[in-house]
Every structure is written in structure tokens, then in C-alpha cells.
Amino acid sequence: DVKVTQSSRYLVKRTGEKVFLECVQDMDHENMFWYRQDPGLGLRLIYFSYDVKMKEKGDIPEGYSVSREKKERFSLILESASTNQTSMYLCASTGLARTDTQYFGPGTRLTVL
Amino acid sequence: QKEVEQDPGPLSVPEGAIVSLNCTYSNSAFQYFMWYRQYSRKGPELLMYTYSSGNKEDGRFTAQVDKSSKYISLFIRDSQPSDSATYLCATRRAGNNRKLIWGLGTSLAVNP
């Protein structure tokens, strides 16, 4: 079974803090994704990575950056957290076989005060 | 217009009912179609995956794709309270780009 783990289930930070969210997958997947999910707005793609050290902006990259130094690990960084970044953050990974699709971690509920 | 449209509901049905969940999409380049289920405060989990027109069945779940009308459906037979969740449809193009285009999700409550 694919396993995608995220570093925290719940996180509370203060405005202006630097926040790191980590995601690890154990299936040797090439692609990894960071989403945020908000009521009424659905899943929105922040960034994705299709290889080590490679990244592409998703639909809402402003205020976020990412790092992928190793194939299994994909980090999301909030350089200076703001209250409008309070959200559920979901990491996903997928391989390149035709039948591969995205497998998700449990999510991190981030609250910025 | 969003590339994938999905009625957010909420949908409330009695236990044992047949549930029909639907999405429409706008781009004929989309070739692969997925349904995910998401329980409250959890990550989405893959329920059904199909890449051709027609029906695919897995237990009480049937995924249906009609590429000519760009319409995808998920049917749940003999619905159970444990089916109460949000159901998200997703699609992608052929090729190595694994980005998914998502519907907003439909919230389903199955009442005992």
C-alpha cells in the first residue's frame, strides 16, 4: 500500500512565523503535490514537483515556496504566515504508470493566529 | 467556466438508497477519470479510476463515463451510513503530466 505521511496533523502558528510542512512518500513516486482545501473552494494546487529539485507553480503559489531535495520528501514553506493561510494542507504523490493516480496524506490543519 | 463542474450538495438519503453523483467536464482532452472519497478531517482516498467510456463496477460502486457528453457518474447501491463523506471527481489529460483537475466535491449523508 502507498503511504504518504505528513509531519503534523494539527499546527498553530502566529502571523509572521516561518512554517514548514513536510511530506514523505514510500512508493518511489516521481510526482508530488501540495494542495490546500477550503470550504466552498475545493482542492487548490499550490505547487507540484515532477522530479528531485524540480518544481512547478500550481494555481495559487503566492506566499508559498517548496523544496524537494530527495525523491521521497516534499516540503511546503510559508515564508511569513498570514491569517488567510489558515487551511487544511494536503500532500499527494503519484508515479508515472498509466494507471497511477494521486495518493494523499492525512492532511495538516494549519491555524495562523 | 470551471473545467470540471460538480454539484456540492449536500445530498441526504436514507440507508439502502441508490445514490447518483455526477460531474461534467469541458475539455475533450481529458482521458482519465477518478472518484475520490473524503471523510471528515481526513485526506481523500481513491475510490474508482477509469479511462474509457462505459461502466466500471467495484462492489456497491459503479463509475460511469460518457465521453460523448463529457459526463461522469458514480452510483452507490445499498448505501450505508459509512458512505457518508464528500465525494470528489477528478480528471486528467493523457501523458506524463499527472496534474488533476478537480470538482468541488459533493457532500453525502446516509441516514440510518
Image (cartoon, helix red, strand yellow):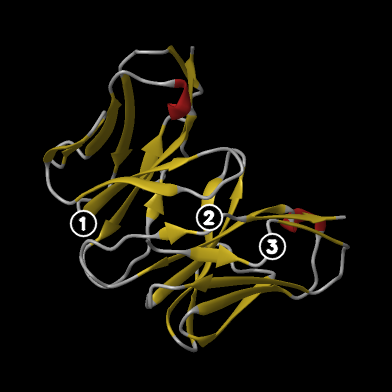
Q: Classify residue B79 by image quadrant.
A: top left
Determine which residue is flagged by label 3.
Answer: A8
Residue assigned mark 2:
A44
Residue type, label 1: Ala
Residue at position x 47%, y 21% in the image: B81
Residue B24 in the image: above or below residue B31: above
Q: Identity of the amino acid at label 2? A: Arg
Above or below residue A10? Residue B39 is above
Q: Nearer the viewer, residue A3 or A62?
A: A3
Task: Check residue B29 in the rendering and tell me which mark sits there, or answer none.
Answer: 1
Residues at marks 3 and 2 on the same chain = yes
Label 3 sits on what residue type? Answer: Ser
The residue located at (62%, 40%) in the rendering is A39
Horizontal and vertical percent position of residue A2: 40, 63
Query: Mark 3 to mark 2: distance in Å?
Result: 20 Å
Under circle 2, the secondary element is strand
Q: Which mark is residue B10?
A: none
Q: Is residue A104 left or right of residue A107?
A: left
Asked whether disc 2 touches disc 1, contact meaning CB atoms under 8 Å apart, the reply is no
Nearest to viewer (mark 3 / mark 2): 3
> Horizontally, is A72 left or right of A21 in the view?
left
